Amino acid sequence: MTVHFPFQNSYSALPDSFFARVAPTPVAAPRLIKLNRPLAVQLGLDPDLLETPEGAEILAGKTVPAGADPIAMAYAGHQFGNFVPQLGDGRAILLGEVIDRNGVRRDIQLKGSGPTPFSRRGDGRAALGPVLREYIVSEAMFALGIPTTRSLAAVVTGEPVIRETVLPGAVLTRVASSHIRVGTFQFFAVRRDTDAIRRLADHVIARHYPELLSAERPYHALLAGVVARQAELVARWLLVGFIHGVMNTDNSSISGETIDYGPCAFMDAYNPAQVFSSIDETGRYAYANQPRIALWNLTRLAECLLPLFGEEQEKAVEQAQDILGVFPETFSKAYQAGLRSKVGLFSERDGDEALIQDLLDAMAKNQADFTLTFRKLGDAAGDPAADGARAEFMDPAAFDEWAQRWRERLAGEQQTAAERQTAMNAVNPAFIPRNHRVEAVIQAAVNNDDYAPFEELVKVLAKPFEDQPDYAAYADPPLPDQRVLQTFCGT
């Protein structure tokens, strides 16, 4: 049988200025590393057929399936604050769109599938390490309940790629609600193509915000919708200690999904100023800066949409500022609600925010592990004698002082200790993609063609909130000699 993709493409039906038609570049000897079988079924694909040699050729870009309309999308973007008027998919090709089992339109894109007109002298390829990192982290984010692009498959190409050294080449099949970015709007705004901006906005509303189709001012409502989704998304990042690492406007999704897992990382010890990305030399995208940068990116989107707000420039700017002004409150509401859940508070009272901030300050001062402190706090909520959270602090007395006030606050809640512990464990993961674990997986694959560590890590991270006694070591922070201090883009 032939692998069938039920494509129903819409983006490639837009004007030619939105993309370049380009086919993936065939590779020598594709070999499937990993297929996300549940996701394949969700997309209406046959996982058994995708695991055949024919399936591997499609997932590597060697064969283009029937019904595909391969394109590289055009976009611009601010990269570390510097505007680049033309970026685009330099190493990614959108095969097409399918409607999944829930009726949601999803892009299927090959990342690392060869050069495009947007490659800017690049080879258009991806190395194995970044492909594995994106597969691991994106699927972990999905399991954590955070809106994200997904990974359908990873394939080695049988061809080397040249970076600082010679590395195995690979292709990631990425699935997204769409790959439309703030930078996509910027591409047309810098060219003063208002018709294209309107066409793009209409497409986005129909695809991602259909409830706005009948809105009195749909473009104002679109900006408000994107603002709300981005505020809530970044709040959820912070609640699990995630650092995107490269929050450029071309990496900011209009759908509200986390996209482009390059030098991303999860914190070990809590540090608001934490940076891992090797290219973020000034800390622009540090952990605690992410809400501010999200608003900065959204402001760039608002600038693009101004021509659609009306002919009176001053009034349009004022309206956009009003919409953007909602971001801090939306973010704070989502973030503070999440923090209350993490410490077992079911109601909101005066003083809660200060109480939780005191914990975070103590964690930062004592280099307490972000993930384990909150996970073990659930144990302490269930059993006052449990001292796991206390042990995360260099000065346990700092935890004791805070815990006394915390327990006094808990006494005013209705829930039993067991109910509180269950609720806390449902929002505080035991397992995250620890940087040293991800690095170990990559090294095993790149150096030894060994994918057993990759398979095991993906398996553990699929159930982040469950105690998994057989894999308890995966919850441990790195030893001093295991710490990963920098992560890299891989381009």
Image (tube, rainbow, N blue to C red):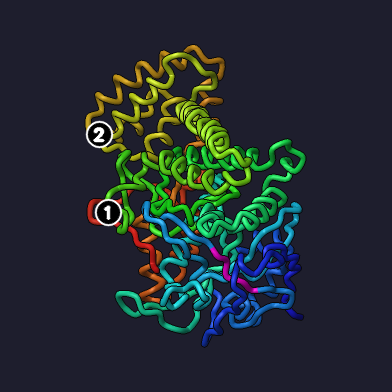
**Which residue is at 75% across, 56% downward?**
101
Disc 1 crowd rating (10 Å Cα; few below 14, some 14-19, many 20+) is few
Image quarter hosting the N terminus: bottom right
Q: Please tell me whether mark 2 sits on a helix, a strand or a loop.
A: loop
Image quarter hosting the C terminus: bottom left
In this rendering, does residue 433 appear at all?
yes
Q: Position of residue 384 (x, y in %)?
A: 40, 22
- Report the amino acid beneath label 2: Asn
- The residue sitting at the front extreme is 312
- Report the amino acid beneath label 1: Glu
**Which residue is at 53% across, 74% downward?**
155
In this rendering, does residue 483 appear at all?
no
User: What mark, if any, has residue 366 been given in the picture?
Assistant: 2
Q: Is residue 458 above or below residue 464?
A: below
Q: Is residue 72 magenta?
A: yes
Q: Please tell me whether mark 1 sits on a helix, a strand or a loop.
A: loop
Label 1 belongs to which residue?
A: 281
Q: Position of residue 292 (x, y in %)?
A: 41, 39
Closer to the camera in the image, 112 or 252: 252
Q: How many numbered marks does the figure carry?
A: 2
Majority SS type along the magenta span: strand
In screen coordinates, is 4 left or right of 303?
right
Find the magenta span and give its range.
70-74
Q: Position of residue 343 (x, y in %)?
A: 45, 27
